[in-house]
Image (cartoon, rainbow, N blue to C red):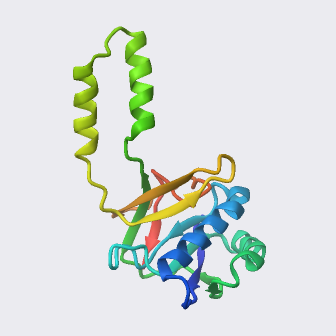
Amino acid sequence: MLTHYFELRAIPQLEITETEVINQVMQSLHQVLVNYQGNIAVSFPCYNVHRTLGGIIRLFGDEVQLQQFKTALQTVVSDYTIALPITPVPTNIKGYLRLIRVNPKGQSALRRAEKRLTAQGKWSDEVKNKMIEKWSSVQLNYPHLHFTSKSTGQNFIMWLRQEKCTTPVQGEFNSYGLSKIATIPDF
């Protein structure tokens, strides 16, 4: 249950931008969130300000888990952020939000489709060209994060779409603090 929250605010740095600080902090948060998967949610109160996620990360959960999480996090992000106190979620809120990862189709999806459709005898240059045309027409204008996978070493971009909701929806959050179903309070 998302009864409490606290915020991590990016400390301005001379050598790196606020966006880069948020990327580094989210990379570190992900490493700790794995242990709290399902119970802690992430939001960005300044979402889409100047087409970025802004300099504030808000974390939601119950008071006990947030305290444990905050303690585990202190040594990881203390150089880059100021952690505000854990506070109950206000009773007067604007509504609810859902933060969803948007996955664009790319070369790996094209290779998988080619393999699958070749096995079915349906692959052709015409099908390939239609897929490329369809997928390349998708423009992602969402704020995003840059990550490096610890397991593969690959760099990737995580595009985030924020949806407004009128009613709360319970659910679990992934190891990035996101959910396709569950909502978080908007205030």
**Left or right position of 105 against 25:** left
The residue located at (68%, 75%) in the rendering is 63
Q: Who's the residue at 59% across and 50% down the image?
A: 154
Quick check: 159 above or below 83?
above
Labels in figure, total: 0
Residue 47 percent coordinates (x, y): 39, 74
Q: Position of residue 179 (x, y in %)?
A: 50, 54
Residue 171 visible: no
The picture places residue 104, in percent across and down from the top left corner, at: 37, 46
* Residue 90 image position (x, y, % from top left): 50, 82
Which one is in front, 180 or 73? Answer: 73
Asked if 179 appears above or below 110 in the picture, the reply is below
Could you tell whether 168 is left or right of 121 in the image?
right
Instruction: Tell me the residue at 46%/61% (across/down).
Output: 183
Image quadrant containing the N terminus: bottom right
- Can I make out residue 35 in this image? yes
Relative side of 151 to 177, left or right: right
Which sits in the foreground, 42 or 150?
Answer: 150
